[in-house]
Structures are given as C-alpha cells and as structure tokens.
Image (tube, rainbow, N blue to C red):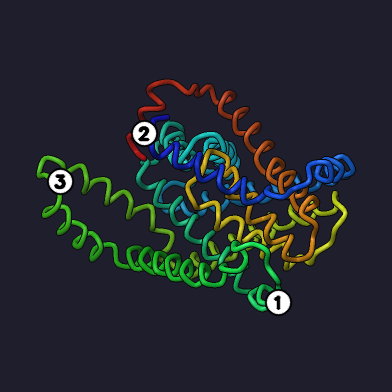
Amino acid sequence: MQIKKWQFWLGVFISILFIWLALRGLKLNEFWQTVQQAKFIWLVPAIGVYFIGVWIRAWRWHYLLKPIKDIPTKTMFPITTIGYMGNNIYPARAGEVLRAVILKRKEGVPVSASLATIIVERIFDGVVMLAFVFVNLSELAKLTSASGFVGNIQQVAIIGTGIFIGALITFLLAAMFPHVTAKIGLWFIERFTPQRFHQRVMSVMNKFLDGLASLRSPLNVVMVFVTSTFIWLLETGKYWFVMHAFDFQVSFFALMLMNGIVNLATTIPSAPGYIGTFDAPGIAVLTAYGVSQATAAGYTLTLHVALWLPITILGAYYLAREGIKWSDSLREEVDKNK
C-alpha cells in the first residue's frame, strides 16, 4: 500500500500524542489489576451484537448499490469485512477503496460508483454520530472535565454538523439533479483538466453519479438514515456489554455520547487501527463521568481490541477464502483509485 512518508509519520506522531494524553498519570498497577479482574465472558455477546451490526452494514451497502446491481447481502458481507480489515491495518482508510476494488473484480461494479455509495455511508454515519452527541449535549454540559477532549466537544460538534450536513445536502442535490450536476461537472472538467483526460474524468464522474441513484427517492434516504441509526445503536450495545466486564456503571446514553465522540475523533489522521484517537477521547469521556482513570483505560483499551481484532481476523479469512492475494496488481489498483 503506497502512502507518502510524511502522511504515515504524521499519523504515527498524532497517535503517540493521543496515547500520551490518554495515559499520562496512569498507575500501571491499578490498570493491570482492573484488567485482570475483568469478566471477559461479556465480550462474547458484545462481539455477537457487533457482527449483527456489520451484517446490517452489508445490507445497507447492498441497498445503496441496488439501482446499479442487485447483489445479495450474503455476497456483500465478506467484502464489507475485508474493507474493515483494510481500514484496521492500512493507513488512510484504504479499506474503503479495497472493498470497492474487490467488488469490481467479483461483480463488475465500477469502482467510482462503489466509492460514491461508500462516501454516502460515511456521511450518514457522521450525521448519526453527531446526533448521538447532540442528544446528550445537556448531559455533556453537566460534566466536569479533566480533559479538553470533552470540554471542547460542543464547539467541535457544531462545526462537524455544518460539514456533514453540508456534504449530505450536496450529495442529495447531486442525486436528485444528475443532469444539472453533470453539466456543472463538465464545465469544471473542460476548464481545469488537460483535454487528454476529459473523457476519462467524465466517465468517472458519470459512474459516480450513478452510485448516488439510491438517494433520488426520499423513502430511500429515510431508509438509509434509519438503518445507519440502528447500526450505531447496535455498536453502542457492544459498548454496554463490554462495560459489564468492568466494575463501573454509566447510562446507555453516556455510552452513546462516548460512541459519538470516539468515532468523530477517529476521523483525525492516525496510525492504522485508530491507535490513540479512539482511546484518548474514550478515556476522557468516562473519567468525566467519574470513572477512575485505571478503569476507564482498562475498559477503553479492551473495547478497542474487541472492535479491532475479530473483524480483522474475519476479513483476513474472507480475503484468503476468496483466493485474493495482496499482490502488486491489487495494490496498484487500490492506489490508483485512492
């Protein structure tokens, strides 16, 4: 996987910084005691609930792609897990492109059309995450924070809302008025790209617009939003189950808030696997609720591993089962579409 060295090292630096912020002052003996006393049997239902959510993600992707090609969810599920594996082990969320490339190889769906649906997924995910934060803003205002992660989240949420809602409106307009969007795109292509690239860029643009076809129906938009909400409630359910492995209790709404803040923070560039950017805000939210640092760290790091490891193993299994090797040709195809 090609990536500029400065981008890689920037991500590593940010991860180290976040880890330092999360763990400074942590008493390791209390941390290890917390982890050793954890009831890890609770990870079994937690992982089960998470994979139900992954299956629904695969169904949502199938639903978004339906106007282009009706692909069964059972076909989409392995490709979805491969994509999440790619996000976990490669920088710059390369797994999103990886699953689009594999879908093209298996089902002939153009990469640009797949990427359009994947971007739509991420926009709806962002809107739901921000909704989780806004639903709990009154609760957030009551917290006394020892960390800037929580103290500044209201301002971050307002800025993030503007970005995600703006992107959503843009995509909805592009989907509802494809011919107007194509004309505007053509104007930019003819004026800002070399003539020898015009045909290729226009082809990519048209396929991308095809990928937005599912958003032309208001019912479809509502369906995708409801599905996205259900997906993230299930993921919060995983947070809830893992909490029972540790000696603390917060409300489900508090875990919704943590889920929203943590996942918004993982949009910050970092080392692969969202190291640090997941952990620091998660620990900060729990300590703001009065959970001890050792318990908050033990819970958050265990949750992170439980989110990272099973989907990565399953994605690697499906990649091997599909007979797809991480060859130079696959790497070049992914890099070309990044």
Mark earlier in primary sequence (3, 1): 1
Q: Quadrant of residue 40?
A: top right
Secondary structure beneath dot 3 equals helix
Residue 58 rendering spot, x and y as whole percentages: 57, 47
Secondary structure beneath dot 1 equals helix
- Tell me if I can see residue 96 in this picture: no
109, 335: nearer the viewer: 335
State the CA–CA distance, disc 1 to disc 2. Answer: 46 Å
Numbered label attached to residue 65: none
Identify the amino acid type marked 3.
His
Q: Residues within 10 Å of mark 1 (few under 14, many from 20)?
A: few
Whether residue 235 is situated above or below residue 251 in the rendered picture: above
Identify the amino acid type marked 2.
Asp
Report if the CB atoms under discs 2 and 3 are less than 8 Å apart: no
Mark earlier in primary sequence (2, 3): 3
Q: Residues within 10 Å of mark 3 (few under 14, many from 20)?
A: some
Whether residue 36 is situated above or below residue 177 in the rendered picture: above
For label 3, the residue is: 198
Which quarter of the rendered picture does the N terminus lie within?
top left
State the CA–CA distance, disc 3 to disc 1. Answer: 55 Å
212, 12: nearer the viewer: 12
Residue 151 rendering spot, x and y as whole percentages: 60, 68
For label 1, the residue is: 142
State the CA–CA distance, disc 2 to disc 3. Answer: 21 Å
User: Left or right of 70: which side holds 207?
Assistant: left
For label 2, the residue is: 335
Mark 2 vs mark 3: give the one in front.
2
Report if the CB atoms under discs 1 and 2 are less than 8 Å apart: no
Mark 1 vs mark 2: give the one in front.
1
